[in-house]
Amino acid sequence: MITIEVTEKVLLGVNVVRGVSVSGNGSDLLAEVAGNLREKYELDDLKVHPVVRAYRDFYWKIGIDPTKQRPSGEALVRRALRGKVPSINNVVDAGNAASMETFVPIGLYDLDRVKGKLRLRYAREGEQFVPIGGKEERLRGNQIVLADDEKVLHVFPHRDSKLTMITEETKNVLVVACGVAGVDAETVMKACSKASEYIVKLAGGNAEKCVLV
């Protein structure tokens, strides 16, 4: 379970999928979800979508310009509407497909690399973070992070750490759907459940029941 230690209104949908096999990709699922999105939305529709609006408002509140650093759910939907959906591996693609469907940012972590208790807390000034695909950086004290007893897994709600990323060695996956004020609990739980369902569909394993934190 994750302990929330921040004053901002946030909620998390959390689950574990055990016994997965990370290989190949989920490009067919991504293409299907992207096609459905293109039937429903145009790029200009996103700025008034209530879930997109909620994450943008949250970003402004915590000092991030959402026109420069897109919320991850919105960024995936934008790529889908442009016909450019990245395919990583079957587990990550499953999470991305669920995020595209719900517009909710979803983090996936190698559970066996998590050490000790998990907390959603404020970063310590100068705390180290190693993002996927980027250079090590030092965090500011006003940033919100998901961290275990040793390291930061995630800068809420848009960037994950290389230290707990999904690899071919991953067997057990921690699923975290990130909700903020203006996004109802049902939507967050739907994102968590969809991600878990798609992971099992593409990578096997057994999903536990999503819980809301």
Image (cartoon, rainbow, N blue to C red):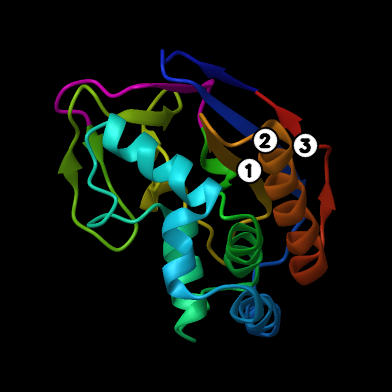
Residue at mark 3 to residue at mark 1: CA–CA distance: 11 Å
Quadrant of the drawing holding the C terminus: top right
Image height check: is 71 above or below 133?
Answer: above
- Residue drawn at x 47%, y 55% is 48
Q: Amino acid at mark 1?
A: Leu
Q: Which residue is mark 1?
A: 174
State whether the magenta stretch is mostly helix, strand or loop. Answer: loop
The question of residue 120 being in magenta is answered with yes
Image position, residue 73 (x, y; %): 49, 57
Image position, residue 75 (x, y; %): 42, 63
Image height check: is 147 above or below 81?
Answer: above
Q: Which residue is mark 2?
A: 14
- Badge 2: residue crowd in 10 Å (few <14, some 14–19, many ≥20): many
Quadrant of the drawing holding the N terminus: top right
Residue 137, picture quadrant: top left
Q: CB under 8 Å between callouts 2 and 3?
A: yes
> In terms of depth relative to the viewer, which is nearer, 52 or 135?
52
Residue at mark 2 to residue at mark 3: CA–CA distance: 5 Å
> In terms of depth relative to the viewer, which is nearer, 40 or 145?
40
**Disc with the residue nearer the chain's start (2 vs 1):** 2
- Residue drawn at x 65%, y 62% is 101
Q: Which residue is mark 3?
A: 210
- Residue drawn at x 28%, y 30% is 62
Q: Magenta stretch?
A: 115-127
Q: Which mark is residue 201?
A: none
Q: CB under 8 Å between callouts 2 and 1?
A: yes
- Residue drawn at x 54%, y 33% is 182
